[in-house]
Amino acid sequence: MQIYRLDALWDNYIFLLHDPESQTAAVVDPAELEPVMDKLRVLGARLTAIFNTHHHGDHVGANQALIEQYPDLVVYGGEGDRGRIPGQQVYLSDGDMVSFGGRAAQVFFVPGHTRAHIAYYFPPMGAEPWGELFCGDTLFAGGCGRLFEGTPAQMVDSLGKLRALPDQTRVWCAHEYTLSNLKFARTVDGDNPILIERLAEVETARRHHQATVPATLGLEKQTNPFLRWDQPALQATAHSAEPVQTFATIRAMKDRF
């Protein structure tokens, strides 16, 4: 399974999954039609599935147009997004499995950003060392999504599920927010040497207009404050040793950053 990162809108990423053997493709969170169609034409591939993580317009904006181009494709999304994702046919819950290109992905129910958000995790297969996590707006490189429909407790539980995945997991998050996220992270975890080094690397990458996605989950665990609610430095910043309160305080600080 090949993964292509496609630029969309202002700072969105669409992910196109390609199976060269069958010349089929699936797309994760198609914000716009043109980047997807352009890549499909280059590959000579046929789209068979849309994997949506949640209902926001910058993740489902091209669903209907893609259905018009490929009437037989299947649209997947969370059970709780029933009626909110255009063209949705399959309603997924925590622990369900989906497949593409001979690989199976586990579905994680990860509410917080929205009430019905899900993520897709393809574990390593064969000689492939990496797992692939498509997490929408729940986990970002260096950050996490705003709490539009969920609570801090829900988000801690959701991020805890993702944090438990192997370090050798690539995090395919849906926005290029890494530089801003890490600048904020330094304000709450400023003595973290791995974070300081990562921020410098990301600043260089962004000056050269290079993408910072995917990130690795191992690095996220070391530098992302929203996966580090149980670390003394973050608890000191939040003036709390309680995980949800620590997370909630740090998230509120990020909202004002």
Image (cartoon, grey):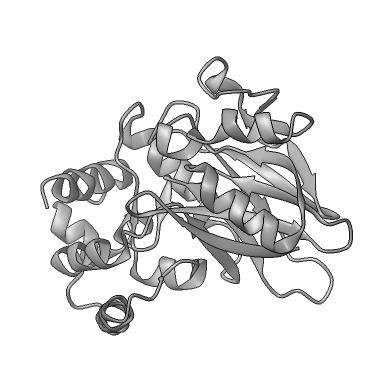
Image point 26% across, 79% down: which residue? 207
Q: How many labels sit on residues?
A: 0
Residue 187 at x, y percent in the picture: 13, 66
Quarter occupied by residue 122: bottom right
Considering every residue shown, the one lying at the far right of the view is 21
Taking 85 as reference, is 15 above or below it?
Answer: below
Judge from the rendering whether residue 46 lies leftward or rightward of residue 172; answer left or right.
Answer: right
Q: Nearer the viewer, residue 245 or 241?
A: 245
Residue shown at 35% from the left, 26% from the top: 149
Asked if residue 145 lies left or right of residue 29, the reply is left
Q: Position of residue 71 (x, y in %)?
A: 75, 29
In the image, residue 43 sits, relative to residue 75, either above or below, namely below
- Residue 121 falls left or right of residue 9: right
- Which quarter of the rendered picture does the N terminus lie within? bottom right
In percent of the image, x 55 and y 14: which residue is there?
83
Residue 95 in which image quadrant: top right
Q: Nearer the viewer, residue 133 or 25?
A: 25
Side of 219 relative to 123 (left or right) = left
Residue 143 percent across, percent down from the top left: 33, 56
Identify the residue shown where x is 70% and y is 23%.
Answer: 89
Q: Residue furthest top?
A: 83
- Toward the left, the furthest residue is 256
Quadrant location of residue 80?
A: top right
Q: Position of residue 118 (x, y in %)?
A: 55, 37
